[in-house]
Amino acid sequence: MTAEIAVMNRVAIALAADSAATSMHGNVAKIYDTADKLFNLDHSCPVGAMLYGGSSFLDLPWEIVIKQFRSAHSKVRPLLKDYANAFLAFLTSDELISDEFVDAYFFSTSNGKLQELLRAARRGRRTTGGTLIESIKLEAKKTLEDLSNRPFLPPMDETTIEALRQRYGTNISELVADGLKVAGPADPEVNNNVIDVLLLSMTKEVELDSTGLVIAGYGEAELFPGLIQLEIEGVIYPRTLRYRQKRETGISLGNRAGIVPFAQAEMVHSFMTGADPSFKVNVSTVFENLLERFGSLLISEVSSSISSSEQQRLAGVIASARQTATSEFGGELNEYARKYHIDPVIAAVAVLPKDQLAVMAETLVALTSFKRRMSKDLETVGGAIDVAVISKGDGFVWIKRKHYFDGDLNPRYFQRIQSRS
């Protein structure tokens, strides 16, 4: 995991990202604290990119992908979304990938979904008994029904499934047959259902392993900064990108400031609202449980003096009142947080100069890192914090940036960078 944040007002947008990256070796988590997650997306235009989640795209490190795009496609574009669209188009281009990358992604993802189905079938077998093949049959049928009711992830449809069958039919049949050997003799009906599950998983609205991508800054025609948050999964034959746009927001005449966290955001929410999100949930749960106990106690106290039908009517009135009180209690908490915490912070951010936007972004990431360090959990947020400020007039400016080398020993590196500007 990671912690990243964007803090923006009408003057600029500040981006900050930690450097921790988690790599799994079997069941052992190895954490590195030197990962690069913040980049300049264009050589000369005020646009940046931040990454969280997955570290690669079709097994290509994201750093290579972004720098290849920057090298070949830096140019002035009217809107921020034009930069996002150009980058998404680049991800499926022959310039970056070949069909070999697409095929490898299909089989690695399909194998992962197959193993996930087998694990679910084994869990089901422990609960219901029976043979493994029976459990696989039930799990495949249940999953197939669920996937059939889900919409296709645009722009995919039935023709995409047919294209996948034609390209991978024999290989996917062999993959499934080999994976189901552990269940005994082959059952053609089960095999076909599992194949359908894998094909639908690649084309329907389901969560696959993804990388979060934030593109932030200005288009040439835009006076105020904005950001676009995407989740990118992979590329499906024939060159269809699996991705979702999670958010598009920015500064406008009616919206003077914004604080947008990504990935591990609990400390930012605590700072903004005055309470940890889990604490607020727990308070609401305790309040509702107390009301429920109060209602039960009230009914038990009067049960000897009223009929059973009146007890049922009273129970219904109490349940309705409890639901109303719980809803109003949550609304009062949110209103208090907005009035005394969120609004004052946003008002302060609206007038911050560029350097203080950077300080705030860095501090909020550092708070999350400190919290992880002081807890019993893995330190999945940490390392140096990279900070950049993007403004209309000054462009993309690094405030803090780590290097894996000593700058004094590599003057030619900075000369090369300067010559590209």
Image (tube, rainbow, N blue to C red):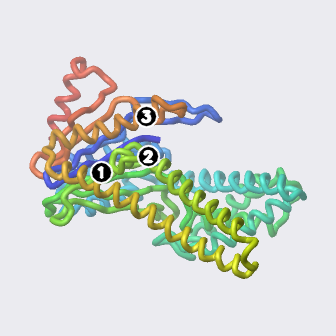
Precedes in sequence: disc 1 or disc 2:
2
Above or below, comparing residue 402 to residue 265 in the picture: above
Mark 2 belongs to which amino acid? Asp
Mark 3 belongs to which amino acid? Lys
Q: How many marks?
A: 3
Q: Residue shown at 50%/52% (left/top)?
A: 283
Mark 2: secondary structure: loop
Residue position for label 2 = 276
Query: In the image shown, does 282 or 392 lie closer to the viewer?
Result: 282
Mark 1 belongs to which amino acid? His
Query: In the image shown, does 414 or 141 lie closer to the viewer?
Result: 141
Above or below, comparing residue 208 to residue 62 in the picture: below
Image quarter of the C terminus: top left
Counting from the top left corner in percent of width and height, residue 331 is at: 41, 64
Badge 2: how crowded within 10 Å, few (<14), some, or many (20+)? some
Residue position for label 1 = 341
CA gap, disc 1 and disc 2: 13 Å
Above or below, comparing residue 390 to residue 124 in the picture: above
Counting from the top left corner in percent of width and height, residue 61 is at: 43, 42
Labels 3 and 1 touching (C-beta < 8 A): no
